[in-house]
Amino acid sequence: MVKVGIVGASGYTGGELLRILAQHSEVEIACVTSRAHAGKPVHKVHPNLRGVLDLSFEDIPYERVAERCDFVFCATPHGASMEIVPTLLEHDVRVVDLSGDFRFEDVAVYERYYGKKHVAPEIKAAYGLPELHREDIKRAKLVANPGCYPTSIILGLVPLLKAGIIYASHIVADAKSGISGAGNKPRETTHFPNAAESVLAYKMTTHQHLPEIEQELRRFSSEARVSFVPHIVPVIRGLTSTLHCFITRSIDAVDVRKLYAEFYREEPFVRVLDVGEVPRLSAVRGSNFADIGGFAVDKERGRVIVISAIDNLVKGASGQAVQNMNIMLGFPEQEGLRGLGIHP
Ligand SMILES: NC(=O)c1ccc[n+]([C@@H]2O[C@H](COP(=O)([O-])OP(=O)(O)OC[C@H]3O[C@@H](n4cnc5c(N)ncnc54)[C@H](OP(=O)(O)O)[C@@H]3O)[C@@H](O)[C@H]2O)c1
């Protein structure tokens, strides 16, 4: 059994890692950290784990975490991860980091969008989107797990971009995320009376996921530019992106769908819907699937609409992190991740 640790295990993605790893046959959870909840059994913070995991949170130096674990997930905020990851790597532990700290090829882009000086710019990671980077992930000591919006938007756009049939510089991504995307710290925007029965656009031109999305899309077209507007919607988990693209030549919906079916043919976690079917959050919630559909073509206006849905905490975070661990350690990619969505 591989001994696994989770730093930041009291947060939402930490809890989701515990839920998934509790059902993983190849790992033993050896260490879970939290500063605020040190000493408490994990089910006091994550009540869904009562009777399942006999573990308590610890607040210990990261050297100790490294000594007790072969593999560590950092489920910590950006800024914190870059302080922790170097120690883990120095101790030869392989790591998946869920924050934005190691996702960028160009540290200057990170520093601009995250407003922080990077303390470990020399450390390089594989970008943990298996559908694009599986071979790099296999070899990596450190995987930077993608953001939730980037996961949904990149998966929803790559087949069209690769086919070269859209204006790459004119893509609109209108995305809606459940409130758990903001983590477990209470905030004015996520406070129930403010968030319920409402929809809120935010960071309309400045969101930190924008350069991450464009970094990956530019592997397929150097001109890729996205008008990305994130919204908070009053659901707890789930993220859907409506992607508007403008086509350079006539194509029908059946052929658009074929591009996706072909591109994702071998992928265990991407489900390509039939023409006219629209992905719904309830079908992916709790699962590691990304559902991609819509495929509506408006010939008069030269538009194609693709819709991509994931669970922000699973394919958008902890499920994808476990998928990456499985790839890094040579386990079956679906191990621990066979859970289905919970529709309705
Ligand atoms: N929520 C999502 O849907 C989602 C999706 C994709 C990626 N992510 C990324 O995943 C990471 C975790 O997100 P989350 O939603 O789980 O956040 P969260 O609910 O706020 O949890 C953060 C965890 O990190 C710990 N922590 C905070 N500051 C720390 C520090 N300076 N040093 C060590 N531990 C610290 C906290 O516990 P203590 O304070 O008790 O130590 C807590 O357990 C973030 O980088 C986030 O951007 C989140």
Image (spheres, helix red, strand yellow):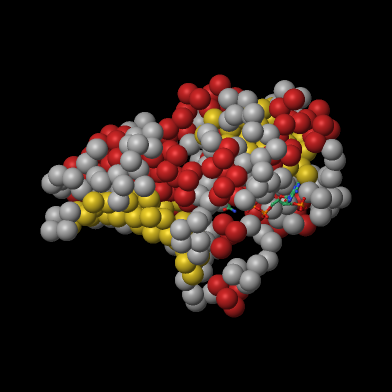
Image quadrant assignment for residue 12: bottom right
182 on left or right of 153: right
Q: Position of residue 327 (x, y in %)?
A: 54, 28
Rendered residue at 50%/56% (across/down): 206
Q: Work out whether residue 168 or residue 193 is closer to the camera in this orientation and state it.
A: 168
Q: Position of residue 331 (x, y in %)?
A: 56, 26
305 on left or right of 16: left
Q: Work out whether residue 214 or residue 178 is closer to the camera in this orientation and state it.
A: 214
36 on left or right of 210: right
Q: Work out whether residue 155 or residue 24 is closer to the camera in this orientation and state it.
A: 155
Q: Position of residue 118 (x, y in %)?
A: 66, 40
Give the vertical position of 340 relative to 203 (above or below): above
Give the vertical position of 70 relative to 259 (above or below): above
Give the vertical position of 174 relative to 32 (above or below): below
Rendered residue at 59%/78% (across/down): 193
329 on left or right of 311: right
Quick check: can you spot residue 74?
A: no
